[in-house]
Image (cartoon, rainbow, N blue to C red):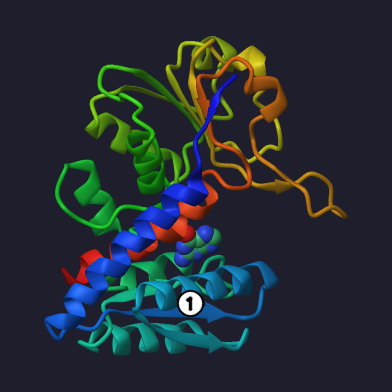
């Protein structure tokens, strides 16, 4: 039986800490403000953006919502980013992804002032992370570090295997675990014998994007298992599952994150944490 790592409770704790910090900043006359830009009306993005606004409200930060029409041009979007970069009352800027296909995501993300890049996607922040300088860290992997630390998981010297090599999760995750002195391996779709590698892991972080792919045959007895995936069990159901086959893995893991209620809630909590840090 694994101990469940409660992302809902830990994210609530972090948001409460942010709330306290915002109150202190306010007492010093400093406002905290996040600008969120959404282009088009993808329903999933609208839900995420709504949750980000709610979280700002909760911690006492101001949020500015820019809901731009689907046909917005690259130039118009860059102009808005320039305006927000130059606005001293805006601390954080976030462009909700994915952008409509006619827009140049790379160019847009690079236009955000790195010191307002609360998503941590700008190459300057990725560079800062990789050489151990202070900067904004991508929220999901930063949240996983908090889940581990606040659940008293020792990281130093442990074998950590990350499955997935995306710029947003897998790669920054590996760098963060390295910074915590883990021995880190990154696996991906071309890894030859995935099971052979994952079975070495004391800490297994799964961000593979395939529902329930990782069952007990991939996991060492007593491992800590972190599941980044989130999928509908079937298209007509509201029931969610992760990349890990929870029922198969839970009996042999020592600690495990559930889906929902594990990694998911941490992303917004860490966004709020980045936002507060952008002022402090
Ligand atoms: N779309 C899905 N997740 C994210 C995220 O963390 N940040 C942004 N900007 N867009 C997203």
Residue at horizontal 27 percent and vertical 79 percent from the top: 32
**In front here: 251 or 119?**
251
Residue at horizontal 36 percent and vertical 65 percent from the top: 272
Above-or-below relation of 115 to 78:
above
**How packed is label 1: few (under 14 Cα within 10 Å), some, or many (20 or more)?**
many
Is label 1 in a helix, a strand or a loop?
helix
Position of the N terminus, as image quadrant, is: top right
Quadrant hosting residue 169:
top left
State the image coordinates of residue 12 (x, y, percent, origin top left).
43, 56
Residue at horizontal 47 percent and vertical 49 percent from the top: 9
Residue at horizontal 36 percent and vertical 72 percent from the top: 59
Q: Mark 1 points at which residue?
A: 53
**In the figure, is residue 267 to the left or right of 102?**
left
**In the figure, is residue 238 to the left or right of 132?**
right
State the image coordinates of residue 76 (x, y, percent, origin top left).
45, 89
**In front here: 195 or 205?**
205
State the image coordinates of residue 209 (x, y, percent, origin top left).
63, 41
Above-or-below relation of 215 to 63:
above
**In the figure, is residue 184 to the left or right of 222?**
left
**In the figure, is residue 45 to the left or right of 133?**
right
């Amino acid at each position: 039986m694994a101990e469940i790592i409660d992302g809902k409770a830990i994210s609530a704790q972090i948001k409460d800490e942010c709330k306290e910090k915002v109150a202190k900043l306010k007492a010093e006359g400093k406002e905290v403000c996040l600008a969120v830009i959404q282009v088009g009306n993808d329903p999933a993005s609208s839900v995420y953006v709504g949750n980000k606004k709610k979280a700002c409200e909760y911690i006492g930060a101001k949020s500015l919502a820019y809901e731009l029409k689907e046909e917005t041009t690259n130039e118009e979007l860059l102009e808005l980013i320039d305006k927000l970069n130059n606005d001293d009352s805006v601390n954080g800027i976030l462009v909700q992804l994915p952008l409509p296909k006619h827009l140049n995501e790379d160019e847009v993300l690079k236009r955000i002032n790195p010191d307002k890049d609360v998503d941590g996607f700008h190459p300057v922040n990725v560079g800062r992370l990789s050489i151990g300088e202070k900067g904004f860290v991508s929220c999901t992997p930063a949240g996983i570090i908090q889940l581990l630390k606040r659940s008293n998981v020792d990281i130093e010297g442990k074998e950590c295997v990350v499955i997935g090599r995306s710029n947003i999760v897998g790669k920054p995750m590996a760098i963060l675990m390295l910074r915590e002195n883990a021995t880190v391996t990154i696996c991906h779709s071309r890894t030859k014998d995935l099971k052979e590698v994952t079975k070495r892991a004391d800490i297994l972080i799964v961000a593979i994007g395939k529902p329930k792919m990782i069952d007990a045959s991939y996991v060492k007895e007593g491992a800590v298992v972190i599941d980044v995936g989130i999928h509908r069990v079937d298209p007509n159901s509201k029931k969610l599952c992760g990349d890990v086959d929870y029922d198969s893995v839970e009996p042999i893991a020592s600690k495990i994150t559930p889906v929902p209620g594990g990694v998911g809630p941490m992303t917004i909590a860490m966004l709020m944490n980045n936002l507060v840090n952008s002022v402090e």
